[in-house]
Structure formats: structure tokens, C-alpha cells
């Protein structure tokens, strides 16, 4: 890429060096000079509506708007002269003409940009004596309320919904002094309910149904942590008062998602205090689950596991782990199963073939795995077999940002229409299940398609071959050999190709990276890799078996036939996931479950251990692109234990009854240190993590003992979650479930398709003629 020309300008007597094309408002930010702005918002189109950013520019006859003015060589700017201050004060007086001045009861009071500006510029009196126009507050949805008199018509909400979300649910009605923001369905919203419009509103005109009138900003504590609903790993700030979460927003706009959160991340936290949340351990007595003390429950688990171990051996015990527990918890579960009990019967619900990608990339994994943080800078993106808008909202947001800012070309191979199709340069619609065949053809293999699809595929291939750099994101439709084909095709493209496998849950990637797989150790070392076995055996204080264990389905089958006697489930619901029809496997003698709710699996267990949720514990999570981030405890869950503590206690109880050696680790941090030292790709700098940033890991499969093989679709499959669902957690999110859109996600999808028509953007295999 050609190097961008640098120019020098002077702002408030300080020289500033910026790339040409920089706006004066951004140049000022480089030297920590804040120019007041209401309508300007980085990343959105320029509006120049509020006139708050007026600055003096030498030789210009009148004040200029810093948000639309490009910095030029030698330009001299002053941002705080008397004339500028008077102009801002006058603008504020004008903005307050119809404003109700109800700061003492407004949700935004204390963190309102308008309030701050009035304090700063002293617009404390008004020359307007006319009666203010009033309009009643409007409820646009369960989550979005609008108070028109507070609105300063900056249009941030309209633009974020249109440009950022591509939903276009907000517009402007009427003219002049009667202008008002209006929702798309007349008097209510039919949209994605993301709350981005509320978050971006500089004043209290848009307020949240879950937070309004509940608290003042200074009454709450703030904890930065990671959203727990999907695999994209958005950073979020939980606002907490009296040990309860009152709202979630990414308050400091930092991290991989900056201001973005989808509906689940922003509003999906009431599962924490759901009345059905498990609060005490349960032990089955007389056929019924009854409350028990932690001591009794843990003692029961240890003695029953010991019984199975003694009578039938380690191979009669199995573990199904979670794709939402932390890396440290997953590592500990593998240690307990393999190092202490001595079985490789360990698996989880795999929602993407991360192992397949690690094997296909081999030693080039480190430089070939893309990150979500990089995606918004992409120049070309190929999406295969995933509805990113529904299943990976942040990935979708990032791709749209790349489209807006860099005119990124979007290519799609999918079986259904997806919202991102509006932005596609070439979209190929294959039959469901044909994604792998399409990739095989791209890699030079034989594959038959209908004439239409063959034509689209040819157009897609030649367009991709003309791209310099491509980021490929793909879902569970590609596994094993198909991923190897994809990497083969990617290697033939002229530029750099990066890959992101798209899984479903908060730590799906971490579960795989930490070795919750029957045939792979942490870091994807194949189980026949003697050196890796020795390394982990030494760390775990017990020899690791070289025989691959049973996968999740095989474990459930063996439990039915009586070969597997005891099953230990952590944060998973295999009965529902693998469709067991709520029937406990006939030959299973003991079932223990660590869970937050009495799921279908927990309901048939012998012991249920109530676990803390992600917002109640610490640890690290790895998002679907391999970016590791830290969870921070925002709440103290009375009576519950983290999965980490439960596993640690269980290990000691087992050692006490003579099963293996106890795991001696004191803290989550100590386990993370062990992970850093033993799992390839995880030797990450800690400073960035501690500061709340994301660090990209890249677990690469070692060559020893590896081959590409296809894991069957029954083992790797997407949960097909939508914007409003995330498995167990969303089932207990009362607010999200009350939304009409949550009841009919297909309807909101098809609405996305309908509004496609009037956009006149390209869809199927035709060149995008209107790319910006
Ligand atoms: S909630 Fe989200 S989708 Fe709905 S109007 Fe606001 S920004 Fe648009
Ligand atoms: S509702 Fe808020 S974001 Fe939207 S135009 Fe009014 S002040 Fe701006
Ligand atoms: S995109 Fe995923 S991680 Fe981000 S807020 Fe939504 S559910 Fe949470
Ligand atoms: S911020 Fe420049 S005109 Fe509004």
C-alpha cells in the first residue's frame, strides 16, 4: 500500500503531524484537545448538524466546523478563543429552546454530553421566552423509550442504525422546529433491539427499558468484563449496585468491539438473578433431587466416582465439558480427567472445527489466523456457511465497518439469504450441506453444481483470485478435509489469506484449545504424540493414556449400553444438545452436573452442583478468533462456587478417597501461568490482558502424529443461535424473551431481506455497482 502523505498543522500553538485526509477534530484529539461535538461520531458519516465543533481557522472569514474540515499543510487552528466560546454558548442556548431541563430526573444526568457542555460554556440563561414545545414520552419497544423534548437532533441514532447496523429502523419526521426522530413501524420499533441508538445518544432522549429510572451513574460500581452469550467476545462494562447488574454497555468504548454490543450483550443479563437459578447443591435421595450441603454433595460425587473407578476402571468414567467455562476451568477439567482419573473420555459440544483449522494451518497458524479486531480493516472478506448477522453479530458489524470505510469486497457462499448479502459483491447460494463441495471445487477438486451455481462459483473464484488480501470466516459446515481444501485454495490466492472459524458460545474456542477433546491434548497435540503426553503427564502428575477416548456421542451411547458407568458434566446440556429425549441413559450408574439451572441433563442427575456464572468469576476466555480476554468478577454469588473451585475441591476429595493425586493450584492466575507455559500459542503478554485488552493466541497443531480427518457432522454442529438466543442463558433472560422479535427470529431475518429490495444493493453474483 502506498505510504500516506503526512501534513503538519498548528492547533492552539502546538504542531500536529497527521496523515492527509484527517479531519481537524481528529487532529485535535491527537494532542488530547477535545473539540465539543454532538453530531460527529467517529466511524459514522459526517452530519454537521449541531455546530458545536466550531473553531477559528486563520485566514478563514468565519468559524469552521472542525468535524467536516480536512486538515491541510500549514493550517492554523484555535479551538478555545473568546469568539469560539461565545458561538458554542449561543448554540447551546439554541439547543435548549425546547429542552425540558429535567436533568434531576433524567437517566442521562451525570453522564450527559449536553449537561457537560452547558456546565463548561455557562449557558445558564436563555433569551427565549416562548412556551416550550412539549411531546409526551414514547415507548418504542420493551427496550427503547424516546423523550422527544430532550432530543438535540444530532442524528447519531439514525446513522448508527442505518450505517452501523444496516437495520434502518429510525428516521426523521416532520420539518423545522417540529422535526423528530421516528421509529420505522409508525409508533414502535421492529428492529434488532441492540440498544446502540440508546448508547450513542449524547443526551437522555433515548433510554433503556431495563435501566431507566433505576439508578444514578455515581451510585454504581463499574466492572469491565466479557459478554458471555456468543463466541465473539465483546468487552462490556457491567454497572452494578447492591450486588445486582443494572445495565451493560462498553462504557470506555475500548476493546475489540469498541461501542458495539448486540441485544444479548446489552440486555441479556437478567438470567443472573432468575428465580430458577440453582442456589444450593442437590443430591438425589429416594428418587428425588433434594437440597444438600456442599460437603455432602461433594462427598457423594467423590465416593460414587471412586466406586466406578474401582469396579470398572477409568475407561468407565466420562466427562462432558463446557463451551462457556473459562480456559482455566477447562484446563483443570482436562487435568482431572486425564491426569487424575486417567481417562481420555472427554469432549464438549463442538460448534466449529478449531482442531481442523489448527491442523490444516500447521506451523503457519500463528500468522494465518485472523482476529475480530482486524476484521474491520479487511479489504476482502469471504463468508462461508454462516449467518453472521444472527450468529456472530460482532463479526457482522466489523465486516460492515470494513465495507463502509475501506470499500471491502464481501463474498458469500451460503445456503440461505443473510443480511450481509446486501453488501456482497458475489453471493453464491448453495444447497444446505454443499458448502464443503463448493470449497473443494475452489481448491481444484471435482464437484457438480447446477448451471446457475456453477456460474456464480466461477464469478466468485475469479473475483477472489484478483484480491490481494482476503479474510475467510466460516461456520461449522466446513470440517476437517473441507478446511484443508479451504487452506489449499487460500494458499493459491495472490495475497495474504487469514482464517477465522466461527463457533457459537463464549468459550467454544477455549474449550477446544484447552483439549476438551477425546483425541487431543491442550494446544491440539494429537494423543499419540508421546512428547506432548509426557509434557502434560509431568505437569499433571499422572501418565496420560495414548488411547483416544470416547467422543460425546459415543459416551452417551456407552452410557446406554452400560460400558460407561459414570458421567460428569460441566456447564453443558447434552440431553438437549444431542437429542436424548430427556431419557437418562439406561446403563449409567452415576451422573453429576455442574450447572446454573436445572437443565434437562441436570434434572436427571444424581448430584447437581450450583455454579457461578461468567459475571461472578474470574478467568480468561478465548473468542472464536483466538483473542484471549479476561473475565472480571462483578458480583459475589452467595452460596455458589465457580466451576474452578468445584473442580479443585473435587480433585482433593477424590485424592482423599484414593483416586489419583490432588490438583494443587491456588488460584485462577496460577493455572493461567501453567497454560501460558504449556499450551502452544498461549504464551501471551499479561500486561495487555490485565489492562482489559485482547491478546491473539494461535494454537498451532504440532506436526507429530497429525493428519487431516473429518469429524462427523453429528459431533461438530452449530447451535444455530440467533440474535436473541444463546442456549441455556437466553432461556432464562426474561427481558429478551419478552421481545416480539425473539419469538420469531425468522421474521426479523426476512424483514432484513425485504428492506434489501429498496436498497438496490447487489445480491446474487452480480457486481456491486453502488459500493461507496
Ligand atoms: S435498538 Fe438497534 S436496531 Fe433498534 S433502532 Fe436502536 S440502533 Fe436500530
Ligand atoms: S435521539 Fe439522541 S441520538 Fe437521536 S437525534 Fe436525538 S439526541 Fe441525537
Ligand atoms: S456479539 Fe456476542 S459477544 Fe458481542 S454482545 Fe452480542 S452476544 Fe455478546
Ligand atoms: S460536531 Fe461538528 S457540526 Fe456537530
Image (cartoon, helix red, strand yellow):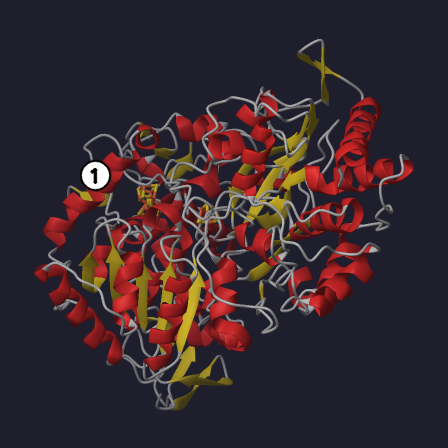
| Mark 1 lies on residue | 184
Q: Is residue 213 rendered to the left or right of residue 223? A: left
Q: Does the image show residue 77?
A: yes
Q: Nearer the viewer, residue 469 or 588?
A: 588
Ligand 1 closer than 8 Å to the CB at disc 1?
Answer: yes
**Which residue of the protein is positioned furthest toward the left in this rendering?**
451
- Position in image of residue 485 (x %, y %): 36, 69
- Position in image of residue 580 (x %, y %): 48, 28
- Position in image of residue 125 (x %, y %): 42, 46
Packing grade of label 1 (10 A; few <14, some 14-19, many >=20) is: some
Q: Does the image show residue 211?
A: no
Q: Residue at x 14, y 60 (%)?
A: 453
Up-down relation of residue 630 to residue 580 (above or below): below
**Which residue of the protein is positioned furthest toward the top in this rendering?**
286
Up-down relation of residue 743 to residue 555 (above or below): above
Q: Looking at the rendering, in which quadrant would you find the C terminus?
A: bottom left
Q: Residue at x 40, y 52 (%)?
A: 476
- Position in image of residue 393 (x %, y %): 39, 50
Disc 1 on helix, strand or loop? loop
Q: Looking at the rendering, in which quadrant would you find the N terminus?
A: bottom left
Q: Nearer the viewer, residue 636 or 28?
A: 636
Q: Nearer the viewer, residue 724 or 181?
A: 724
Amino acid at each position: 500500500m502506498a505510504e500516506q502523505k503526512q501534513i503538519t498543522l498548528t492547533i492552539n500553538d502546538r504542531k500536529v503531524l497527521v496523515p492527509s485526509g484527517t479531519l481537524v477534530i481528529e487532529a485535535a484529539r491527537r494532542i488530547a484537545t477535545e473539540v465539543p461535538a454532538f453530531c460527529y461520531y467517529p466511524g459514522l458519516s459526517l452530519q454537521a448538524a449541531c455546530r458545536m465543533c466550531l473553531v477559528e481557522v486563520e485566514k478563514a472569514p468565519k468559524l469552521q466546523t472542525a468535524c467536516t474540515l480536512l486538515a491541510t499543510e500549514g493550517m492554523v487552528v484555535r479551538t478555545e478563543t473568546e469568539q469560539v466560546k461565545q458561538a458554542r454558548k449561543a448554540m447551546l442556548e439554541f439547543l435548549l429552546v425546547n429542552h425540558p431541563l429535567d436533568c434531576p430526573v433524567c437517566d442521562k444526568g451525570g453522564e450527559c454530553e449536553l449537561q457537560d457542555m452547558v456546565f463548561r460554556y455557562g449557558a445558564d440563561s436563555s433569551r427565549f421566552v416562548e412556551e416550550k414545545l412539549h411531546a409526551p414520552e414514547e415507548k418504542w419497544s420493551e427496550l427503547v423509550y424516546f423523550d422527544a423534548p430532550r432530543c438535540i437532533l444530532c442524528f447519531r441514532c439514525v446513522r448508527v442504525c442505518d450505517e452501523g447496523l444496516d437495520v434502518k429502523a429510525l428516521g426523521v419526521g416532520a420539518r423545522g422546529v417540529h422535526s423528530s426522530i421516528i421509529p420505522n413501524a409508525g409508533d414502535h420499533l421492529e428492529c434488532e433491539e441492540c440498544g446502540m441508538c440508546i448508547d450513542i445518544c449524547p443526551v437522555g432522549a433515548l433510554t433503556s427499558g431495563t435501566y431507566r429510572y433505576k439508578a444514578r451513574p455515581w451510585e454504581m460500581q463499574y466492572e469491565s468484563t466479557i459478554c458471555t452469550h456468543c463466541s465473539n467476545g465483546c468487552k462490556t462494562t457491567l454497572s452494578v449496585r447492591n450486588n445486582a447488574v443494572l445495565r451493560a454497555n462498553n462504557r470506555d468504548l475500548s476493546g475489540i468491539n469498541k461501542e458495539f454490543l448486540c441485544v444479548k450483550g446489552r440486555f441479556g443479563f437478567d438470567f443472573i438473578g432468575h428465580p430458577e437459578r440453582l442456589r444450593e447443591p442437590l443430591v438425589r435421595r429416594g428418587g428425588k433431587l433434594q437440597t444438600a450441603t456442599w460437603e455432602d454433595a461433594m462427598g457423594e460425587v467423590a465416593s460414587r466416582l471412586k466406586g466406578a473407578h474401582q469396579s470398572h476402571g477409568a475407561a468407565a468414567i466420562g466427562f462432558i465439558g463446557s463451551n462457556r467455562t473459562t480456559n482455566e476451568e477447562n484446563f483443570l477439567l482436562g487435568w482431572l480427567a486425564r491426569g487424575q482419573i486417567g481417562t481420555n473420555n472427554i469432549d464438549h459440544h463442538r460448534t466449529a472445527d478449531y482442531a481442523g483449522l489448527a491442523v490444516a494451518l500447521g506451523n503457519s497458524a500463528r500468522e494465518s489466523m485472523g482476529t475480530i479486531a482486524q476484521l474491520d480493516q479487511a479489504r476482502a472478506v469471504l463468508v462461508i456457511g454462516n449467518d453472521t448477522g444472527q450468529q456472530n453479530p460482532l463479526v457482522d458489524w466489523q465486516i460492515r465497518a470494513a465495507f463502509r470505510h475501506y470499500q471491502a469486497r464481501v463474498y458469500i457462499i451460503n445456503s440461505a439469504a443473510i443480511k450481509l448479502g446486501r453488501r456482497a459483491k458475489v453471493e453464491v447460494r448453495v444447497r444446505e450441506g454443499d458448502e464443503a463441495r463448493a470449497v473443494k471445487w475452489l481448491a481444484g477438486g471435482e464437484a457438480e453444481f447446477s448451471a446457475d451455481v456453477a456460474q456464480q462459483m466461477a464469478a466468485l473464484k475469479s473475483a477472489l483470485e484478483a484480491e490481494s488480501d482476503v479474510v475467510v470466516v466460516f461456520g461449522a459446515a466446513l470440517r476437517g478435509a473441507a478446511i484443508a481444501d479451504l487452506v489449499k485454495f487460500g494458499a493459491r490466492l495472490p495475497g495474504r489469506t487469514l482464517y477465522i472459524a466461527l463457533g457459537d458460545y463464549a468459550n467454544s474456542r477455549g474449550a477446544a484449545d484447552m483439549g476438551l477433546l477425546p483425541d487431543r491434548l491442550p494446544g491440539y497435540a494429537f494423543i499419540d504424540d508421546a512428547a506432548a503426553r509426557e509434557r502434560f503427564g509431568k505437569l499433571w502428575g499422572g501418565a496420560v493414556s495414548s488411547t483416544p477416548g470416547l467422543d460425546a456421542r459415543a459416551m452417551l451411547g456407552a452410557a446406554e449400553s452400560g460400558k460407561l458407568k459414570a458421567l460428569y458434566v460441566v456447564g453443558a446440556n447434552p440431553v438437549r444438545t444431542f437429542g436424548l429425549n430427556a431419557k437418562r441413559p439406561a446403563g449409567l450408574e452415576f451422573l453429576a452436573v455442574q450447572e446454573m439451572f436445572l437443565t434437562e441433563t441436570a434434572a436427571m442427575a444424581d448430584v447437581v452442583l450450583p455454579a457461578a456464572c461468567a459475571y461472578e468469576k474470574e478467568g480468561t476466555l478465548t473468542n472464536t478468533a483466538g483473542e484471549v480476554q479476561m473475565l472480571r468478577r462483578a458480583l459475589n454469588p452467595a452460596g455458589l462456587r465457580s466451576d474452578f473451585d468445584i473442580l479443585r475441591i473435587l480433585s482433593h476429595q477424590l485424592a482423599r478417597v484414593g483416586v489419583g493425586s490432588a490438583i494443587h493450584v491456588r488460584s485462577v492466575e496460577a493455572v493461567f501461568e501453567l497454560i501460558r507455559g504449556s499450551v502452544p500459542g498461549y504464551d501471551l503478554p499479561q500486561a495487555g490482558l490485565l489492562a482489559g485488552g485482547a491478546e491473539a493466541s494461535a494454537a498451532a497443531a504440532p506436526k507429530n502424529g497429525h493428519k487431516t480427518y473429518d469429524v462427523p457432522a453429528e459431533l461438530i454442529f452449530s447451535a444455530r443461535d440467533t440474535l436473541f438466543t444463546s442456549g441455556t442463558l437466553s432461556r432464562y433472560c426474561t427481558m429478551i424473551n419478552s421481545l416480539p422479535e425473539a419469538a420469531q427470529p425468522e421474521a426479523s431475518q426476512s424483514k432484513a431481506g425485504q428492506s434489501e429490495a429498496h436498497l438496490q444493493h447487489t445480491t446474487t453474483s452480480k457486481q456491486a455497482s453502488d459500493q461507496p
